[in-house]
Image (cartoon, rainbow, N blue to C red):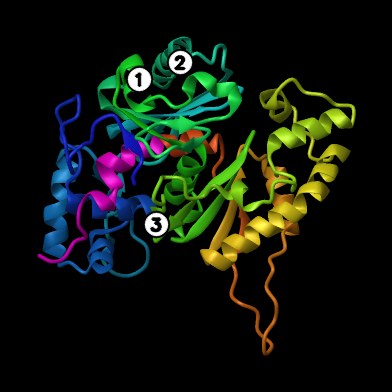
Amino acid sequence: MNAITAGDYPTHFLRKDGRRTATANERVVMDLLSRRGPSSRADLARLTGLAPHSITRLVEPLIARGFLHEALPVAAGRGKPAAKLALEGDAAFAVGLSVMTDAVSLVLLDLAGRVRSGASERLSDTEIQPACQQIRRMIDTAIADAGRDRSTLIGIGVGVTGYFIGDGARLNPPRLLDPWALVPLDTILAEELGEKVWIDNDGNVAAIGEAMLGHGRVSRDFAYLYFSAGFGGGIISQGLPLRGGHGNAGEFASILPADWPQPNLEALRMTFGEHGRPFPDLHAMLADFDAGHPAVDAWLDRCLPSLNLVASAISATIDPGAIVLGGRLPASLASRIAQRIRLTNPERRGFHRPSARILPSTIDGDAAAIGAATLPLRAAFFDLEAGHMLTGD
């Protein structure tokens, strides 16, 4: 099950500015450049196993359509210097939205994976129509502030907290987002926002963002723990999202028995209140976060057994290369959690089972909004599931 979109794109399609996006074979080249950075034609030939002239036939149309640029060769040592191909960030961009119980965050992400603009506001009204009015205003402002050409907008990705109920894009979010519950969000938001829309839950989109722009550039298999008002995540296997039969793989909170503490940031906010520092919502707590406050130690001591159980279950069942800590988790707190998590991994004959590394996310900014913005870009340029791997001349 892929991310839900209001109408499916074919493998390649025409954009508003008349340029088609990427064919199946072109996606392989663009995916490599996204993950590895600027590379020469010889690099691409070696990585794909294709002859140099086949690589040339693939990259020249991409250069002509403005999706790649080729830098002038730079001499470095002996031999003829090779020019490097790179993604052209100005050629396309996507909007990413994260809709939370207390706030909405937005980013503009360009084709090269750079955040060109961002904003976060308290959600003024959880009813969908007024919320979309607020979101439209935020999008218009961000596009104007970034000086972007709207005709190069690929679409809008939206991450919403909650789980799918197995019927299209119908999510079951927390009580505070009642108006967003059990309705066809893909078609509703596409109509309200006037653009093509992709929908997924916040944990999945954050994991996808990490796969494209973070640890996924070096690790093709990892689990992502998403900390927000709730607790969940996503799974990346061989560089692709593992969604499960109902789209809900990564609902890690369900591993915990009912009477165990849930390691979410709402519980941390309540713990701050118990220690004499109340905050009205997560938005306020994260804006003035003090990692050295005693409330943080109390929350961490309380939640550590739950985190150890979840991480151990993930390590034993999925066997990922890494477990990434992210979401709305402050970087200072992510580092402390990473240092303290302990996996159940008994020794046998002097060996422990190879286990996942526990790593803070490398994404700087709202992970779900950034991940949501990658959904339209993946669909248009990078999603290898949409086509076939290169197989020859």
Helix, strand or loop for disc 3: loop
Helix, strand or loop for disc 1: helix
Which residue is depicted at the point 17% across and 40% down? Answer: 10
Residue wearing tag 3: 239
Q: How far apart are marks 2 and 3 (CA)?
A: 33 Å
Which residue is depicted at the point 47% across and 36% down? Answer: 370
Q: Which amino acid does label 2 sit on?
A: Ile
Q: Which of marks 2 and 3 is nearer the N terminus?
A: 2
Residue nearer the viewer, 346 or 157: 346
**Mark identifier at residue 128:** 2
Q: Which amino acid does label 3 sit on?
A: Gly
232 versus 55 height, above or below: above
Crowding around mark 2 (Cα neighbors within 10 Å: few <14, some 14 to 19, many 20+) is: some
Asked if residue 377 lies in the magenta stretch, the reply is yes
Crowding around mark 3 (Cα neighbors within 10 Å: few <14, some 14 to 19, many 20+) is: some
Q: Earlier in the sequence, mark 1 or mark 3?
A: 1
Quadrant in the picture for the C terminus: bottom left
Seen as rendered, the residue at the extreme bottom is 349
Q: Position of residue 142 (x, y in %)?
A: 44, 19
Please give the range of residues in magenta.
373-393
